[in-house]
Image (cartoon, helix red, strand yellow):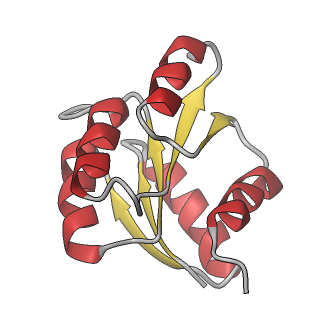
Amino acid sequence: MAKILIVDDAEFLRMRISKMLRADGHDVIEAENGLRAVEKYQSEKPDIVLMDITMPEMDGLTALKEIRAISSNTASVVMLTALGQESVVLDAIKSGAKDFIVKPFERERVLNAIAKLLPKG
């Protein structure tokens, strides 16, 4: 399956998504803010990044731009967003995010977003 980096400042949310993804056979790495996400992206080279937008240290939009600067052609980033952040989501898509998931989310929505980004075969 895929190596997936989950980035969110809420530990309970990272744990919830990690558990879901591991049950689906994926390898999971976690980061608690955008700064750590960029570091882990460089060291771990995940296939997909699920990233919250609003976080301390470095927000998800800034981290997305930094990750895209590291590997613009291969970075598959899905933004996690709260309701009412539509303008930020548009910025994220323009900056290279592949998809976005609105919180609270359904398990199937997360797994479908990941499946769309995995190589076919």
| The N terminus lies in quadrant | bottom right
User: How many badges with numbers are in the image?
Assistant: 0
* Vertical position of residue 32 compared to residue 48: above or below: above
* Vertical position of residue 67 compared to residue 1: above or below: above
* Vertical position of residue 98 compared to residue 119: above or below: above
| The C terminus lies in quadrant | bottom right
- Relative horizontal placement of residue 117, taking residue 71 as reference (left or right): right
- Relative horizontal placement of residue 70, taking residue 76 as reference (left or right): left
Residue 58 position within the rendered picture, expressed as x and y whole percent measured from the top left = 22, 34
Residue 21 position within the rendered picture, expressed as x and y whole percent measured from the top left = 62, 71
* Vertical position of residue 21 compared to residue 50: above or below: below
Q: Residue at x 53, y 12 (%)?
A: 87
- Relative horizontal placement of residue 9, taking residue 81 as reference (left or right): left
Q: Residue at x 34, y 41 (%)?
A: 64
Q: Residue at x 60, y 15 (%)?
A: 86
Residues 31 and 73: in front is 73
Q: Residue at x 46, y 71 (%)?
A: 47
Residue 17 figure quarter: bottom right
Residue 115 position within the rendered picture, expressed as x and y whole percent measured from the top left = 72, 67
Residues 121 and 28: in front is 121
Residue 37 position within the rendered picture, expressed as x and y whole percent measured from the top left = 27, 54
- Relative horizontal placement of residue 66, taking residue 19 as reference (left or right): left
Residues 24 and 88: in front is 88
